[in-house]
Image: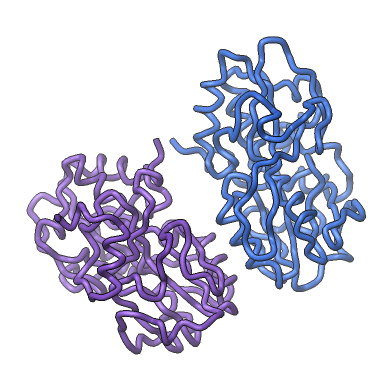
Chain colours: A purple, B blue
Amino acid sequence: MENSDMTPAQVRERARTENMVTTAGYARGYMQANLLAVPQRYAFDFLVFAQRNPKPCPVVGVLEAGQLNSELFPGGDIRTDIPAYRIYRDGVFTEEKTNVLEEWSDDMVAFLIGCSFSFETALYDNGIPLAHIEQGRNVPMFNSCLPCAPAGIFSGNMVVSMRPIPQDRIVDAVRITSRYPEVHGAPVHIGDPASIGIDDLAQPDYGDAVDIPDGTVPVFWACGVTPQAIVMNSRPDFAITHAPGKMLVTDIRDMNYQIP
Amino acid sequence: MENSDMTPAQVRERARTENMVTTAGYARGYMQANLLAVPQRYAFDFLVFAQRNPKPCPVVGVLEAGQLNSELFPGGDIRTDIPAYRIYRDGVFTEEKTNVLEEWSDDMVAFLIGCSFSFETALYDNGIPLAHIEQGRNVPMFNSCLPCAPAGIFSGNMVVSMRPIPQDRIVDAVRITSRYPEVHGAPVHIGDPASIGIDDLAQPDYGDAVDIPDGTVPVFWACGVTPQAIVMNSRPDFAITHAPGKMLVTDIRDMNYQIP
């Protein structure tokens, strides 16, 4: 079976036992979600932060304390169904683990956040080439100087993903991705990386560098890794995230997030 | 000056000193918001409830504890800038007041929730008649039997607003309002009131009854009064809402909530 033909439940089952390189390309057409989990005492502040920053932090689901799955992944377990997790203590990334059964206390609240993988299918289906996929790499992501609106203890700058888009397809790329407002939506910037605080496209802060094809322009979208940067900046005493590129594959179709 | 030509700040100033009959028709083109304020201990549960029920509870702003205004109403005061407020104790509506300066403690968190007034302008501009406006009444609102997704202590059924729409404009009404997903969006039901638990259109639970013109069909939208029904059902020990039809008029244009 091709990876793209696997069901979401099959991908989650594999993720339970295997640290997959990435979930990109698996269970094509189904939404993949970013994870941020924090103790209850930080949960309200983060949810307000997300409400104020819907482009980088579009919340597609909340697991309350004690809740381990939802209609997004029925029968699943948030502590095991992602290929790899990152643990942050006092804002510092301390370890990467393939499950967080030991670390997950009864008062952890989990936020599932939309992912730009959802609109990549639409770009691809419309004939817009995606360099990172053609080059077999993770999408490059950068810390920008674009500030998020603060809420409670949480503040910091937006993380953006970059895709080099052919000059004559930029309008199409904006048009197509703007139809997915709940999974990051339209780009936040087109062109000059320096003007949003990115010095070197060859040195991403997360993911892999890609070769920039001739005739393309770098286009930047708000990225669901933003909560990880916000955690590092805001230093809650404990947080768990997914590892970049290794997502929760849900039973919800990407199409559900498309505006007709 | 016509009411419709007043600026949002002018309407808020009037609301500070006068219990206006309604804010409908004032400051045309600017978003009006519903209010639910609860003590901090209930705030996370309500924000999760809103995330799970975006049609009746589209949150357009959150005032954290101690915060009295925001970029939605700069220089304003959430305790005075609405014509009338309702106080709920243990889920029971106990009193209506023109300000809540005495009742507002430092730990109150305020949720501003989108309002269907925002799409009424678009309906009107597209030549769809609105019976309640033509008849000089408040829109009729009903408790439905449509359940909301519960979260924490909050659960209950959706409140819906009803507008009789000419048979040959129903498609247009759906099309137009679906472009406003953050202010209740497309209808939740068209036609038979009984099938969503409404026995008698002449006896609304909130607002005014309207005469149903010949050749029209009742169309129902999720309503921002839903949080009041949820409070009555869920019985937090204290809550403050706006009085139905008397809203917070914001500086944000309705157009900001339209999907192009």
Instruction: Say which of A236 and A165 sits in front.
Output: A236
> Percent from the top left, x then y, of residue B109?
70, 66
B54 horizontally vs B204: left or right: left
> Percent from the top left, x then y, of residue B113?
65, 50
> Percent from the top left, x then y, of residue B43?
67, 66
In the rendered view, would you say B99 is above or below B200? below
Instruction: Say which of A159 and A40 sits in front.
Output: A40
For the point 52% across and 73% down, the residue is A109
Marker count (numbered): 0
In the picture, residue A81 is in which quadrant?
bottom left
Please identify the residue farthest to the front as the structure is shown: A75
Instruction: Say which of A19 and B36 sits in front.
Output: A19
In the rendered view, would you say B170 is above or below B26? above
Q: Quadrant of the N terminus of chain B?
A: top right
B102 horizontally vs B174: left or right: right
B203 horizontally vs A28: left or right: right
For the point 41% across and 48% down, the residue is A181
For the point 16% across and 53% down, the residue is A130
In the rendered view, would you say B116 is above or below A219? above
Please identify the residue farthest to the left as the structure is shown: A214
Residue B77 in view in this figure:
no
Residue B136 in view in this figure:
yes
For the point 11% across and 59% down, the residue is A212
> Percent from the top left, x then y, of residue B159?
71, 42
In the rendered view, would you say B245 is above or below B72? above
Q: Quadrant of the C terminus of chain B?
A: top left
